[in-house]
Structures are given as C-alpha cells and as structure tokens.
Image (cartoon, helix red, strand yellow):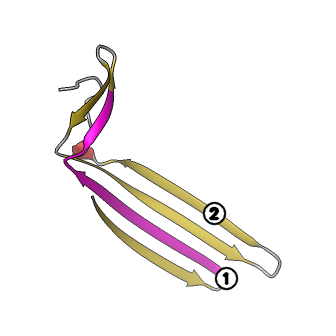
Amino acid sequence: MTTTEGELGVQLGKTTDQQRMPTTRFDDPIVYVFDDATLDNYINRNSAGTEGFDLRINRESKTSVVLAGLGIYRPQEARTYPRSTCG
C-alpha cells in the first residue's frame, strides 16, 4: 500500500483553513465483487486505489468555536472494476 498526500494550512486571524489531498494505491489486491449470476466473488487485480480532497475550516471567537468540514473521495479512474464481470 502506498499513500501520498499534500496538505496546506492557512491561519488568518482566528480562522484556520486546512486542505488535504490524499491518494492511496494497493498493488495486487484481492477485491470483493457482487455479480447477479455468481453472487459473491473475489478477484485479483493489478492495483486498486482511491483519491480525494478534505477541507476543514475552524473559526474561533471569545465564547465559541465553529468547525466545518467536507471530504470527497472516489476510486482512481484507471482502477475501477467491472460491475458484473468476475474473471
């Protein structure tokens, strides 16, 4: 497994903004798939992985702290799997 990520953080006054972009890759994984014909199955793949984006915002005042976050992840495009093919 290999994970690569970049992170950037900025603080302006009492507001902090953090952005993170991770990519994770697995070499030679065994992947679970579901096929209507064969039902459950496991297949070998050359690689699998995900990539994404995280955003965190932190705002402080004298009496409170507001935190907000968003994360979006997806399979890496070249590593997606057929929905019903198990071979």
Q: Which span is picked out in magenta?
A: 15-33
Q: Quadrant of residue 78 in the image? A: top left
Name the disc covering residue 40, or none.
none
Q: Label 2, on which residue?
A: 68
Q: Amino acid at mark 2?
A: Ala
Instruction: Compute the Cα span from label 2 to label 1.
Output: 14 Å
Q: Residues within 10 Å of mark 2 (few under 14, many from 20)?
A: few
Contact? badges 2 and 1 (CB < 8 Å): no
Say which residue appears at 27% left-offset and 55% top-offset.
25
Q: Earlier in the sequence, mark 2 or mark 1?
A: 1
Residue ID at (25%, 30%)? 82
Where residue 65 sits in the image (x, y, percent)? 73, 73
The part of the image, by quadrant, that contains residue 42 is top left
Q: Is residue 76 magenta?
A: no
Q: In this image, 83 relative to 16: left or right? A: left
Query: Looking at the picture, which amino acid does disc 1 mark?
Result: Lys
87 or 76, which is in the foreground?
87
* Residue labelled with disc 1: 14
Callout 1 secondary element: loop
Q: In which quadrant will I find the C terminus? A: top left
Of 6 and 85, nearer the camera is: 85
Q: Residue 15 is drawn in which quadrant?
A: bottom right
Q: Secondary structure at mark 2?
A: strand
